[in-house]
Amino acid sequence: MSRNRYTIGVDFGTESARAVLVDVADGRELATAVHQYATGVIDERLPHPDEDVVLEHDWALQDPANYIASFQVAVPRALAESGVDPADVIGIGIDFTVCTMLPTTADGTPLRFLDAYRRELHAYQNLVLDGTGAEPLLVARVRDPDSGRVLELLTTEPALPMYSGNQLPTIGGKRGAEYRVYAVCAWNPSASRTL
């Protein structure tokens, strides 16, 4: 391994991902690469083999398979263009359009990859909420199966980032309760638009 150190940034946009390789010593940009998503923005029907699922007006989805393909294509392309040894890369930073939430199982598998959910629109990333405007729209509903309590969120904003608490350590709560990963969630209605 050489004494040089590099970092790669990957920006996941609406229709493509861009990778940039930078020398950490002086910030020089050494190479860039772009990977166009195979499915682009999914706004008419789901990708093969589920193209019979037609989307209603104002849906805009992304397929998590595009994110994986971007790492497999854009990052190696930038490394090859620069001639940098991958062993000299000390970090990777990522950025997404707005706050793109990826629904996954507890082990990180995107729900869209599971047969049980691959035809479910909400197993994909939603770029914007559909139907927002002057009247509040029901955009989220969570039900606790143990207590039966329900939380509903209405908003007029086009984006709804959700934070799931997946970085929380186990912490103690009231009356000896333990709060673990995914035990909490928070929503942040936002006026950010991506389309």
Image (cartoon, rainbow, N blue to C red):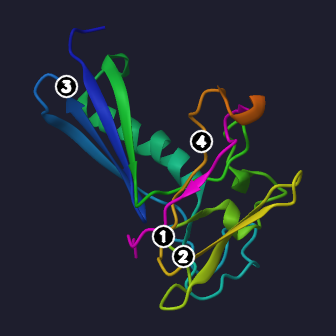
Task: Report the residue that reaches farthest toward the bottom.
Answer: 134
Q: Are marks 1 and 2 in contact (CB under 8 Å)?
A: yes
Q: Are marks 2 and 4 in contact (CB under 8 Å)?
A: no
From the viewer's perspective, is residue 190 above or below residue 132? Answer: above
The span from disc 1 to disc 2 (Cα, nearest Å) is 6 Å
Mark 1 or mark 2: name the one nearer the start of the chain.
Answer: 2
Residue 190 falls within the magenta-colored stretch? yes
Mark 1 or mark 3: name the one nearer the start of the chain.
Answer: 3
Q: Are marks 2 and 3 in contact (CB under 8 Å)?
A: no
Q: How many C-alpha atoms fall within 10 Å of the one at disc 1: few (<14), some, or many (≥20)?
A: many
Q: Nearer the viewer, residue 173 or 102?
A: 173
Identify the magenta region. 177-195
Q: How many C-alpha atoms fall within 10 Å of the one at disc 2: few (<14), some, or many (≥20)?
A: some
> Which image quarter: residue 43?
bottom right
Q: Are marks 1 and 4 in contact (CB under 8 Å)?
A: no
Q: How many C-alpha atoms fall within 10 Å of the one at disc 3: few (<14), some, or many (≥20)?
A: some
- What residue is pinned by disc 2? 129
Mark 4: which amino acid?
Gly
Q: Please state the horizontal and vertical placement of residue 134, each as a whole percent of the image.
A: 48, 91
- What residue is pinned by disc 1? 159
> Which image quarter: residue 42?
bottom right
Q: Please state the horizontal and vertical placement of residue 90, each as a whole percent of the image.
A: 34, 21
- What residue is pinned by disc 3? 24
- What residue is pinned by disc 4? 165
Mark 2: which amino acid?
Leu
Q: Nearer the viewer, residue 16 or 144?
A: 144
Residue 42 falls within the magenta-colored stretch? no
Q: Residue at x 29, y 29 (%)?
A: 7
Query: SS at mark 1?
Result: loop
Residue 72 relative to residue 137: left or right:
left
Residue 177 appears in the rendering: no
